[in-house]
Image: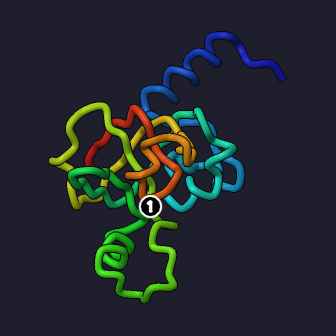
Amino acid sequence: MTISLKTALVSAVVGLASCAHPPMPGLDQTTTSITPVQLISQSRTLQGQRVVVRGYFTSATDTRALWESETAALDARQQRLGSNVDYWAKCITVYPEMASTRFNRRLVVVTGTVAVIEKEDARSLWTCNPVALEDAVIGAE
């Protein structure tokens, strides 16, 4: 079975228009976005690729973060689960293209390029997790 060039181009344009991307390994074929925890688990495989991630966004003076949920952000802020919990396992750092304070403490969709921030990188001092989204565009969910 062969696909015509016209069919392939139409499929590509429709895919771009809907911000869809190819399904990622281990995810449902209909998935067009992932969560911060899914991104963390696949960060090395997805490094350098543009992805869409849904989560709870917080913006502070030195860090913009995307959390798995509002509860995860509150747990970390209040350290409600005790000192032996890795609160940062449900958070990725976001480097937005534009000001992002209007999305603070809201559920959002973030499109960005996956980066793994190494310890030698000065940004590692202000990350909630070495996994980050660069050149990120944030939108309301």
The type of residue carrying mark 1 is Cys
Q: Where residue 36 sits in the image (x, y, percent)? A: 49, 57
Q: Where residue 104 sits in the image (x, y, percent)? A: 21, 55
Q: Where residue 45 sits in the image (x, y, percent)? A: 69, 44
Way the structure is coloured: rainbow
Q: Is residue 49 above or below residue 83?
A: above
Q: Residue at x 34, y 36 (%)?
A: 137
Q: Which residue is mark 1?
A: 91
Q: Residue at x 74, y 18 (%)?
A: 3
In this rendering, would 105 be left or right of 113?
left
Identify the image quadrant of residue 57. Answer: bottom left
Kind of element beneath mark 1: strand
Q: Residue at x 20, y 37 (%)?
A: 99
Q: Is residue 83 above or below residue 101?
A: below
The front one of 49 and 88 is 88
Q: Residue at x 39, y 32 (%)?
A: 135
Circle 1: is it few (<14), some (14-19), or many (20+) Cα within 10 Å? many
Q: Where residue 106 sits in the image (x, y, percent)? A: 24, 59
Q: Name, please, the residue furthest toward the right.
A: 1
The front one of 67 and 107 is 67
Q: Name, please, the residue furthest toward the left.
A: 102
In this rendering, would 10 be left or right of 134?
right
Q: Name, please, the residue furthest toward the top.
A: 5
